[in-house]
Amino acid sequence: MWSSKQPDNANPGSAHSVTPQPAAPQYTNPSYNPNVPAPAPAFETVHSGDAGAKPFATLGAGLTIKGQITGEEDLRIDGKVEGGISLKGQRLTVGQNGEIVSDVHAREVVVYGKVRGNLHAGDRVEVKKDGSVVGNITAGRILIEDGAYLKGQIEIERNGKSKQNVVAGELETVGAGSTKSSY
């Protein structure tokens, strides 16, 4: 009645042991396959893992937008935009496939793609080696990498003032001296 022999499936070293397998999940949506990654959305807001990191939005390569874009977050454009872009205090990145035909106002502009229009940045503008800008650039700092294309004028702003205002102020200061002569 009390036998010391255990059944074969209870002994893990036994040649007849069987490990139970979980049942394959049944999906009701025939187009859903968990083994295939979902396509990247054309527009998304991305948050970095850092708690203090600012979110940024992305316009995908398949999008063409005609009209104004305004916002209060960083933006990356990989598609085509025709119309004004105003991201005061934010960063605009034009991706390698990105094409912009408009004037841009932002704190910082980084160009990997093509821009036809004027760039106004409160802080800096970077034109990367494969980037192209046809238009004027106004910023506090400008970086143009070797191999980049630029056709337009550059104006450096100092402390939020354009170069023309600074030069005019310096001329007034120089000419505002005393009328007495030391001869």
Image (cartoon, grey):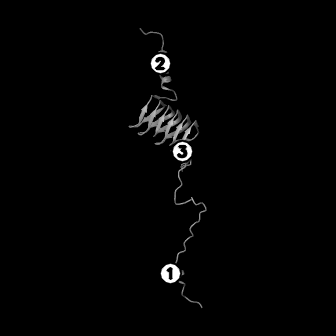
Q: Which residue is mark 2?
A: 171
Q: Quadrant of the N terminus?
A: bottom right
Callout 2 crowding tier (Cα within 10 Å): few <14, some 14–19, many ≥20:
few
Q: Quadrant of the C terminus?
A: top left
Looking at the picture, how far across and down is residue 35, in whole percent?
52, 60
Question: Residue drawn at (47%, 18%), measured in percent from left and top?
Answer: 171
Secondary element under disc 1, as helix, strand or loop, is loop
Q: Quadrant of residue 27?
A: bottom right
Callout 3 crowding tier (Cα within 10 Å): few <14, some 14–19, many ≥20:
many
Alpha carbon of mark 3 to alpha carbon of mark 1: how far? Answer: 56 Å
Residue type, label 2: Leu
Q: Which residue is mark 3?
A: 58
Disc sitting over residue 16 in the figure: 1
Of badges 3 and 2, nearer the viewer stands: 3
Question: Residue drawn at (54%, 38%), measured in percent from left and top?
Answer: 90
Callout 1 crowding tier (Cα within 10 Å): few <14, some 14–19, many ≥20:
few
Give whichever of discs 3 and 2 has the lower sequence position: 3
The answer to whether residue 126 is left or right of residue 31 is left
Using the image, determine if residue 14 lies above or below residue 85. below
Q: Quadrant of residue 58?
A: top right
Mark 3 and mark 1 in contact? Answer it, CB < 8 Å.
no
Using the image, determine if residue 147 lies above or below residue 168. below
Alpha carbon of mark 1 to alpha carbon of mark 2: how far? Answer: 98 Å
Residue type, label 3: Thr
Alpha carbon of mark 3 to alpha carbon of mark 2: how far? Answer: 46 Å
The answer to whether residue 149 is left or right of residue 78 is left
Can you name the residue that lies furthest to the front here? 30
**Residue 113 visible, this angle:** yes
**Residue 54 visible, this angle:** no
Looking at the picture, how far across and down is residue 115, in whole percent?
48, 35
